């Protein structure tokens, strides 16, 4: 898993994906949590999920992800 440069860890739980994404379409990485492999959405996937929502906080999160992870996104 790629952590932000400042070491800050933010957990963003997804309650539903809406119509734009299906769970099988989510780009994820497996990380080890105390011996258990846990799928975690990649920063690029989180950006894609948040950039076009109506919530201003999601759009702000998307911009932060783009900048922090130097995402080259379409």
Image: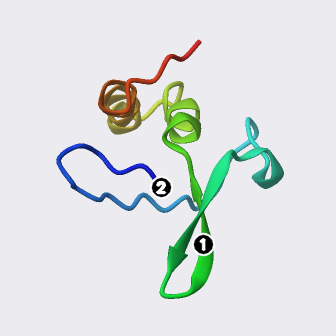
Location of the C terminus (image quadrant): top right
Q: Position of residue 11 (x, y in %)?
A: 38, 62
Q: In this view, does 12 lie above or below 4?
A: below
Query: Does 10 sit above or below residue 71?
Result: below
* Label 1: element kind: strand
Give the residue at x 50% y 17%: 72
Mark 2 residue element:
loop
> Closer to the observer: label 1 or label 2?
2
Are dots 1 and 2 in contact, CB under 8 Å? no
User: Between disc 1 and disc 2, whose residue precedes?
Assistant: 2
Residue closest to the eye, 65 or 32: 32
- Please give left or right for residue 33 compared with residue 18 in the image: left
Please name the residue that numbered disc 2 is placed on.
1
Most foreground residue, 62 or 44: 44
Residue at position x 23%, y 43% in the image: 5
Q: Is residue 28 above or below residue 67?
A: below
Q: Where is residue 2 in the image (x, y as percent from the top left)?
A: 42, 49
Q: In this view, does 18 lie to the left or right of 63?
A: right
Query: To which quarter of the image does residue 39 belong?
Result: bottom right
3D distance between C-alphas at marks 1 and 2: 11 Å
Q: Which mark is residue 61?
A: none
x, y percentage for residue 54?
47, 30
Q: Which residue lies furthest to the top in this view?
A: 74
Q: Name the residue under label 1.
A: 38
């Amino acid at each position: 898993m790629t952590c932000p440069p400042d070491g800050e860890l933010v957990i963003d739980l997804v309650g539903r994906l809406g119509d734009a994404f299906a769970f099988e379409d989510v780009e994820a990485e497996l990380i080890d949590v105390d011996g258990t492999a846990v799928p975690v959405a990649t920063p690029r996937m989180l950006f894609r999920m948040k950039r076009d929502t109506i919530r201003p906080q999601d759009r702000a999160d998307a911009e932060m992800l783009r900048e922090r992870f130097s995402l080259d996104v379409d």
